[in-house]
C-alpha cells in the first residue's frame, strides 16, 4: 500500500487526476472503475478541465461504476447514472454506450444482474484503475461492514449509518433507497490498480482501520491491504488518526527519488 498524505482536499484531487491522466495517456482504451459520492467530484472537475483544454480524451475509454441504487430509473435525479452524467460523462467525449453501472430493476434478478456485470467487466479486459472513496464506516463501494472479502457484484442492504450519512443528499420529498447493487470486494481487488481518495476528519477513523487495522470484514476497506497496487491519497485531516504519518510522509519523499512524480502507476 502506498499512502500519500497531502495538505488539502484540492491536492488530493490534483494528485488523483494525475494518476487518471497518466493511465489514459499510456493506454487510451483504458478501463476505468468509477465512484460516486462527494469525494471524487473535484477529481472529475479536473478531468473535465483537461478534456476542455484538449489534453485528455475519453473517446476510447470504458467505465464501470462501483454501484447503483436498486430499482432506480436512470433519469431519477438521485441515480448514480445521473450523478455520473452530471459530473463527468456529459462534459467529455465518452460515448454513453461505453459507460456501465450495475443496474437492477424490480423485475430483474439481482443475482443474475450481478453475474452479468462481472462478465461484462471481464469481457472488456478487466479494470485498469479503480477509483474509490471510503465510507465513515469503512465501506468501499456499498460493501458495508460484515461484507464477505470474497464478495462479487450483488445486492446489499445499506447500514443505518450509511443511510444517515447520505441522507444529506436527499430532499424531504425524495425516497432514499435502502438497497444497492455494488461490485464486491473481490471484484474491486481484481482491478490492476486501485486509488482510494479520502478527505476530512470524519474519515480519519476509517482510514486508520483501513491502513493499519487488522484485515477485517468490519472494515471492508482493509481488504485493500491485500492489493498489490493500492494507492491511498488522503488529506491531513483524513490522516489525523494515523500514528504512522511521519513514516508515510518520509516514504513518499524517498519514493520520489526513484521515480519521477508522474511515474505513479509503476510505483507501489
Ligand atoms: C459511491 C461509493 C461509496 C463512497 C463513500 C464515500 O460510489 O462507492 O463507497 O465512495 O460512501 O462517500 P463520500 O465521498 O460522499 O464521502
Image (spheres, rainbow, N blue to C red):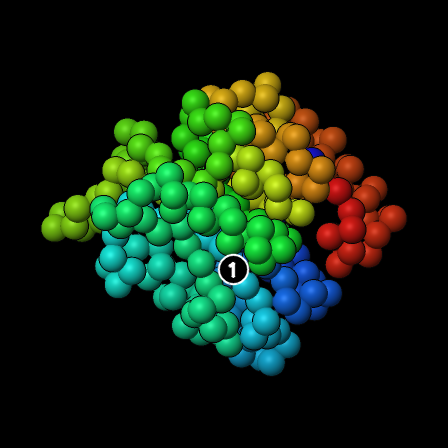
Name the spot of residue 138 as percent of width and height, x first: 47, 31
Rendered position, 25 above or below 2: below
Rendered position, 73 above or below 28: above
Question: Which corner quadrant holds the C terminus?
Answer: top right
* Left or right, residue 245 beside residue 110: right
Disc count in the image? 1
In which image quadrant can residue 242 be found? Answer: top right
Rendered position, 5 above or below 259: above
Question: Which corner quadrant holds the N terminus?
Answer: top right
Q: Nearer the viewer, residue 48 or 145?
A: 145
Q: Residue at x 53, y 29 (%)?
A: 150
Q: Nearer the viewer, residue 172 or 30?
A: 30
* Left or right, residue 120 beside residue 83: right
Rendered position, 181 above or below 74: above
In which image quadrant can residue 240 be found? Answer: top right
Name the spot of residue 206 as percent of width and height, x first: 49, 29
Q: Nearer the viewer, residue 19 or 12?
A: 19
Q: Residue at x 53, y 79 (%)?
A: 52
Q: Which residue is mark 1?
A: 63
Name the spot of residue 97 as percent of width and height, x first: 45, 69
Name the spot of residue 162 as percent of width and height, x first: 33, 35
Q: Which SS class for mark 1?
A: strand
Q: Is residue 237 visible?
A: no
Q: Is residue 153 visible?
A: yes
Q: Residue at x 25, y 57 (%)?
A: 73
Q: Residue at x 44, y 58 (%)?
A: 100
Mark 1 CB within 8 Å of ligand 1: no
Q: Residues within 10 Å of mark 1 (few under 14, many from 20)?
A: many
In the displayed image of the protein, which residue is found farthest to the right? 258
Amino acid at each position: 500500500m502506498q499512502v500519500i498524505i497531502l495538505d488539502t482536499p484540492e491536492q488530493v484531487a490534483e494528485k488523483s487526476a494525475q494518476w487518471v491522466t497518466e493511465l489514459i495517456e499510456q493506454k487510451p482504451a483504458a478501463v476505468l472503475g468509477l465512484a460516486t459520492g462527494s469525494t471524487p467530484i473535484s477529481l472529475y472537475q479536473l478531468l473535465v478541465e483537461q478534456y476542455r483544454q484538449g489534453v485528455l480524451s475519453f473517446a476510447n475509454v470504458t467505465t464501470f461504476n462501483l454501484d447503483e441504487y436498486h430499482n432506480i430509473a436512470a433519469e431519477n435525479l438521485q441515480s448514480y447514472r445521473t450523478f455520473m452524467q452530471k459530473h463527468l460523462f456529459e462534459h467529455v467525449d465518452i460515448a454513453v454506450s461505453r459507460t456501465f453501472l450495475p443496474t437492477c430493476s424490480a423485475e430483474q434478478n439481482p443475482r443474475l444482474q450481478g453475474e452479468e456485470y462481472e462478465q461484462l467487466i471481464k469481457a472488456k479486459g478487466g479494470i485498469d484503475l479503480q477509483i474509490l472513496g471510503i465510507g465513515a464506516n469503512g465501506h468501499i463501494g456499498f460493501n458495508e461492514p460484515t461484507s464477505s472479502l470474497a464478495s462479487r457484484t450483488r445486492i446489499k442492504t445499506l447500514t443505518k449509518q450509511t443511510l444517515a450519512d447520505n441522507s444529506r443528499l436527499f430532499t424531504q420529498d425524495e425516497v432514499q433507497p435502502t438497497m444497492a447493487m455494488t461490485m464486491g470486494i473481490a471484484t474491486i481487488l481484481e482491478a490492476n490498480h486501485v486509488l482510494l481518495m479520502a478527505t476530512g476528519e470524519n474519515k480519519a477513523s476509517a482510514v486508520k482501520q483501513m491502513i493499519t487495522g487488522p484485515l477485517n470484514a468490519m472494515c471492508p476497506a482493509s481488504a485493500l491491504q491485500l492489493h498489490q497496487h493500492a494507492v491511498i491519497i488522503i488529506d491531513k485531516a483524513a490522516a489525523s488518526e494515523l500514528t504512522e504519518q511521519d513514516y508515510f510522509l518520509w516514504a513518499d519523499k524517498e519514493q520520489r527519488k526513484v521515480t519521477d512524480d508522474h511515474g505513479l502507476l509503476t510505483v507501489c
